[in-house]
Image (cartoon, helix red, strand yellow):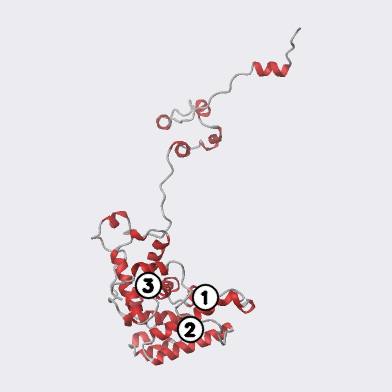
């Protein structure tokens, strides 16, 4: 019996094997060729040695190096996307004698200073009369004449740095990098916020949360959206059901507790309390029923853990 081979089968039998494409580029050889101007003679061989998907990228040596690196080099090491300071690097962390990237001097365990910082933030939040507050605090003429702050310039600088530092520590806590923080930075927060807050019966985590907002708004009326109250205020508030406003109601109650704790005298307490009442009425809350806080809440994630890590339990 004769066996007939169809044209298709004959084509398959006589098909030549595919040209093998090497998996490794000789980048150094190509580089030397480029430097000697010999690339024009190697154009055809170059096309036969690089992967087909890479031919469109052969315009520059940089592209070829990138292709080779993708095929042969290990992936780059993980790096955090946290904001970093040029002085805040591994070399400094390995040397405990290095100074903190936040070289400012807040009075240690200064209850009065913490109260002033928080009065500044609360007054800005509710649009209180700074001129009236300055007269109640018996401030000097330079501060009182501005009517937009109760702090001197050096105090504002220190508050800004303190706010930046406490937020940095919170981020380190959130990203499991707290072991990379400096002891001096941790001591600053403990002495400037945690210890004074405990002394005036104010939750330290809530105090840190309030302080951290200052770096975002810095008392600028155009940035009032960065206050804690604004963060918990939903859009179209008047049309929201009760459950959607619970955090806002709790925040307002917590701010009332803060006002009681930080007021340096009764006049300041009344002035801040009135500003809070007026603010609530604008929101449509003449009363806040069925919500009670035995501690200041809500607190943004990370501050409770930071408080537990820094709180000097042996002293209190």
Q: Which residue is mark 1?
A: 230
Left or right, 152 with reference to 291: left
Looking at the picture, how far across and down is residue 83, in whole percent?
A: 40, 60
Q: Residue at x 75, y 8 (%)?
A: 2
Secondary structure, mark 1, is helix
State how far apart marks 1 and 2 are (Cα): 13 Å
Q: Is residue 178 above or below residue 229?
A: above
Q: Which residue is mark 2?
A: 127
Secondary structure, mark 3, is helix
- Camera-side residue: 54 or 1? 1
Left or right, 196 with reference to 242: left
Front disc: 1 or 3 = 1
User: Which is nearer the N-term, disc 2 or disc 3?
Assistant: 2
Q: Is residue 45 above or below residue 283?
A: above
Q: Residue at x 31, y 66 (%)?
A: 185
Looking at the picture, how far across and down is residue 163, in whole percent?
A: 38, 71
State how far apart marks 1 and 3 are (Cα): 20 Å
Q: Is residue 64 above or below residue 43?
A: below
Task: Give the numbered dot on residue 160.
Answer: 3
- Camera-side residue: 316 or 128? 316
Looking at the picture, how far across and down is residue 128, in whole percent?
A: 46, 86
State how far apart marks 2 and 3 are (Cα): 20 Å
Mark 1 residue crowding within 10 angstroms, few (<14) / some (14–19) / many (20+): some
């Amino acid at each position: 019996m004769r066996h007939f081979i169809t044209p298709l089968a004959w084509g398959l039998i006589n098909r030549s094997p595919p040209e093998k494409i090497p998996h490794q580029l000789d980048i150094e050889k190509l580089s030397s060729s480029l430097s000697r101007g010999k690339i024009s003679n190697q154009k055809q061989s170059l096309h036969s040695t690089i992967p087909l998907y890479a031919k469109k990228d052969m315009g520059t040596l940089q592209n070829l190096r990138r292709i080779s690196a993708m095929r042969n080099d290990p992936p780059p090491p993980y790096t955090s996307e946290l904001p970093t300071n040029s002085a805040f690097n591994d070399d400094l962390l390995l040397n405990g004698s290095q100074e903190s990237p936040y070289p400012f001097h807040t009075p240690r365990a200064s209850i009065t200073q913490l109260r002033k910082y928080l009065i500044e933030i609360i007054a800005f939040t509710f649009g209180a009369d700074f001129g009236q507050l300055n007269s109640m605090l018996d401030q000097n003429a330079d501060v009182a004449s501005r009517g937009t702050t109760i702090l001197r310039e050096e105090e504002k600088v220190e508050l800004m740095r303190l706010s930046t530092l406490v937020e940095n520590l919170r981020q380190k806590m959130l990203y499991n990098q707290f072991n990379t923080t400096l002891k001096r930075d941790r001591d600053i927060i403990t002495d400037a916020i945690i210890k004074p807050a405990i002394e005036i019966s104010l939750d330290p985590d809530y105090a840190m949360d309030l302080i951290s907002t200052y770096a975002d708004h810095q008392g600028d009326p155009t940035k009032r959206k960065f206050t804690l109250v604004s963060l918990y205020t939903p859009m179209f508030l008047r049309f929201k059901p009760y459950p959607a406003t619970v955090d806002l109601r709790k925040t307002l109650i917590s701010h009332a507790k803060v006002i009681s704790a930080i007021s340096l005298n009764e006049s300041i307490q009344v002035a801040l309390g009135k500003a809070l009442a007026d603010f609530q009425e604008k929101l449509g809350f003449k009363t806040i029923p069925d919500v009670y806080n035995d501690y200041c809440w809500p607190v943004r994630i990370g501050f409770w853990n930071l408080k537990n890590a820094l709180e000097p339990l042996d002293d209190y």
